[in-house]
Amino acid sequence: MNLEFSPEDNAFREEVRTFIEENYPKELANKEREEFSKEEFLAWHQILGKKGWSVPSWPVEYGGTGWTPTQKYIWSEENARADTIMPLPFAVSMVGPVIYTFGNQEQKDKYLPGIRNGTTWWCQGFSEPGAGSDLAGLKTTAVKDGDEWVLNGQKTWTTLGQFADMGFFLCRTNPDAAKKQEGISFILADMNMPGMEVRPIIMTDGGHEVNEVWLTDVRVPAENLVGEENKGWTYAKFLLAHERTGIAGVARSKRGIEKLRIIAAKETDNGKPLIENPDFAEKISQLEIDLTALEFTELRTIAGMQKGKGPGPESSLLKIKGTEIQQRLTELTMEAVGNYAAPYFRGFPTDGDNVFPIGPDYAHQAMPTYLNMRKTSIYGGSNEIQRNIIAKAVLGL
């Protein structure tokens, strides 16, 4: 694989960089994700939709850009460099590919435009209190009643579900199936339907990012079933493979290391910049080495996808290593800012507190980010489950 950037690729990088500089909403710069409104989350997505750049990994016939793997890589790098808020994955990277791969033409015509344009917010209804890593153990049911499905059950860890217009749900449609994976269907539901209730879950960092979703006799049109009845497990595995590939977050981690180096150059250890401490410098260097190895693996995976090869066990490897690197990055940031990470600043200054935060600005989100990123090794299929997948698919164990 040739890893040199061609003149055309460099020209593309300049085009992307210029577009971001001229069009990314200035009011979003330096604003924490936790402070975003629904409209702010969607602002960049909608700008990209008008440009035709919102779904670069989709096939061209459904609105994709037709970019090469290298161009997609450059696109990710430049957005990470500018700290943009990218289109959320639930629609673009998860349900969208399921719909254009397994959905019928009516579903494609109805739902794909809203995903491309950023006018419809989607959430994921997979995990349940007793069905997380063992997702096939889910208990939410969908019972056919005439030309409708009636949904009952509870979903949990529904990220940003409080903003969602639509949701995609795994439901048990055949409780008597020989294998629990065989009795599951993939159903789309309007989040504003009667019987749909979203309840907040407040996380350890104090933020409201995830939710419980309760479904009580929610009636969904029969045509909202994607693909075949009782084949939802197949579609879920397809979706999760795409999700895990995106979770790796190589470009964002590279940007995170750049920020960490800046922090370490400003913080001191025994009167000298922390970056000059051999032990701390070694930790950063090892993190960069691991990230470079992950980057090459991601590039090979992207190149394979470009040739029509869907992500296989590589997505599990990317998910494991990517999330481990993200967590180590937050740990090193905590170590770098030291005691400045301890104060609790969530809600400042909107709660009326007139006490100014202690320490430099870059320290204020170190603790909340560290706490929040503990989730990355669990969502999208826990890293332990991913190791089992690799053991079976690669090692044949």
Image (tube, rainbow, N blue to C red):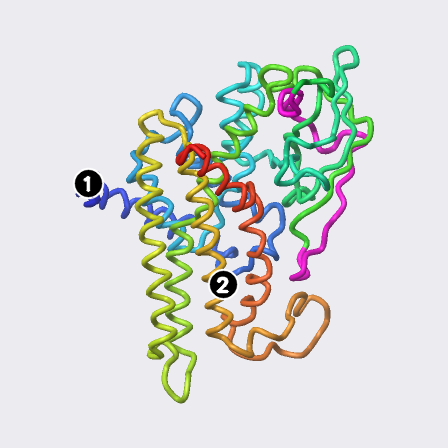
- Dividing the picture into quarters, in which one does residue 114 lie? top right
Per the rendered image, the range of residues in magenta is: 179-207
Residue 296 is covered by the magenta coloring: no
Which quadrant does the C terminus fall into? Answer: top left
Residue 16 rendering spot, x and y as whole percentages? 33, 45
| Residue depicted at x 48% and y 40% | 244
Looking at the image, which is closer to me, 91 or 101?
A: 101
Left or right of 221? Residue 269 is: left
Numbered disc 2: secondary structure: helix
User: Magenta span has 189?
Assistant: yes
Decide: few, some or many residues near mark 2? Use Cα within 10 Å; few <14, some 14-19, many ≥20.
many
Q: Position of residue 351 (x, y in %)?
A: 72, 68
Give the camera-side residue of 364 and 182. Answer: 182
The kind of residue on which mark 2 rests is Thr
Where is residue 192 shown, x and y percent of the image?
74, 33
Q: Which residue is mark 1?
A: 2
Residue 91: assigned label: none
Q: How many marks?
A: 2
214 to the left or right of 313: right
Give coordinates of residue 85: x percent, y percent: 49, 49
User: Along the horizontal axis of the image, is 362 left or right of 2?
Assistant: right
User: In the rendered image, which quarter is residue 9 located in?
Assistant: top left
State the residue position of label 2: 330
Please identify the residue farthest to the bottom as the structure is shown.
271
**Of the residues under marks 2 and 1, which one precedes in the sequence?**
1
- The reply to whether residue 344 is in sight is yes
- Alpha-carbon span between mark 2 and mark 1: 32 Å
Amino acid residing under circle 1: Asn
The residue drawn where x is 56% and y is 37% is 90
> Considering the image in quadrants, where does the N terminus appear?
top left
Asked if the residue under mark 1 is in contact with the one under mark 2, i.e. CB atoms within 8 Å, the reply is: no
Residue pictured at 38% horizontal, 68% vertical? 283
